[in-house]
Image (tube, helix red, strand yellow):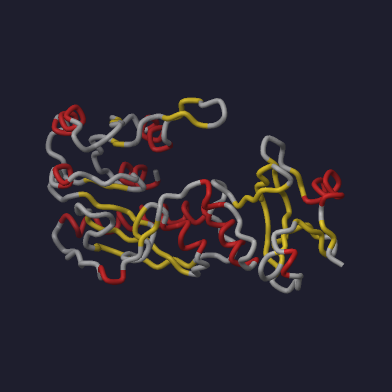
Amino acid sequence: MPALKKLRESGYKILAVITAPDKPVGREKTITPPPVKITAQELGLKILQPPKLRGNSQFWDELKSLGDIGLGVVAAYGKIIPEEILELPKFGLLNIHPSLLPKYRGASPIQAVLSNGETETGVTIMKLDKEMDHGPILAQKKVEIKPNEKYPELSERLSEIGSDMLIDILPDYFAGKIKPAEQNHSSATLTKIIKKEDGKADWSLGANWLYNTYRAFYPWPGLWTEWEGKILKIIECSPDDAVITAKADTGALAIDGGKLGFICGKGFLIVKSLQRAGEKILSDSQFIQGYGKLIKKIP
């Protein structure tokens, strides 16, 4: 969305915005438009929402009806662009990718750098080709990851940085002053589509590793576990690797020195708020008050 707004503010003519169809969201399955559609509507722009790109003659006709297309800009679209569409704009399609390519190609680069405990990531502006995140690079910028930064904050920062980068390079790109550089494909790493199961805690791991998982998957799918017959989602937490516990207690919800948390393979994941499936969010003190008899006490 920042890219769309900044392109408009910079005086570029936007022929259309292409985004995913509206979809049902939440328990009530309320039909909800993608955020970029809302922004496009506010800006009074033409909106296209094809259910698929490949083999879609209606969408192709809509693209052709736009006239001469100079450039396409892609940000978090999540689909492979067919070759015939890549060749349609005069200057191709540029992608704002939130990683330092060729590392972390694919659907979840931000979640991957956080879960891996990286301290640095970045943004790449690349020209799309027919393979995923494979095309030549026009610009890159390294970005430091803050110690307790979670997915929403880092995603927003990278989006803003990438949008500024795009606006900065476009004049030179259109003038032919930027020579795209091929990626080092032998160094490429891939990320996957995130599923709910990815947030399930493996308590045999260390507290710091699990905290990174929490940062990566906040708010969805979140860091969660099964406790007393229900899914228990951890809303806010912090790691303490100094706590020494018995290996046999790994995975137990416990109280240590008045602090609620889970015993990990190494250390203790302190939990400050949590939520059982179908129930409201509780603070640590509220949870202890309600379920104290079921929680292990560390001497």
**Residue pictured at 49% horizontal, 56% vertical:** 154
In this rendered view, identify the residue nearer to me: 248 or 14: 248
> Horizontally, is 25 left or right of 48 in the view?
right
Marker count (numbered): 0
Q: Position of residue 103 (x, y in %)?
A: 35, 66
Quarter where residue 248 is shown: bottom right
**Residue pictured at 66% horizontal, 48% vertical:** 226
Q: Position of residue 149 (x, y in %)?
A: 56, 59
Quarter where residue 40 is shown: top left
Q: Is residue 270 above or below residue 38?
A: below
Quarter where residue 244 is shown: bottom right
**Residue pictured at 80% horizontal, 60% vertical:** 259
In this rendered view, identify the residue nearer to me: 18 or 59: 59
> Horizontally, is 116 left or right of 227 in the view?
left
In this rendered view, identify the residue nearer to me: 163 or 34: 34
Q: Is residue 7 above or below residue 25?
A: below
Q: Position of residue 136 (x, y in %)?
A: 21, 62
Quarter of the image containing the N terminus? top left
Toward the front, the furthest residue is 248
Quarter of the image containing the C terminus? bottom right
Q: Is residue 183 above or below residue 158?
A: below
> Horizontally, is 11 left or right of 103 in the view?
left
**Residue pictured at 43% horizontal, 65% vertical:** 121
Q: Position of residue 18 (x, y in %)?
A: 29, 36
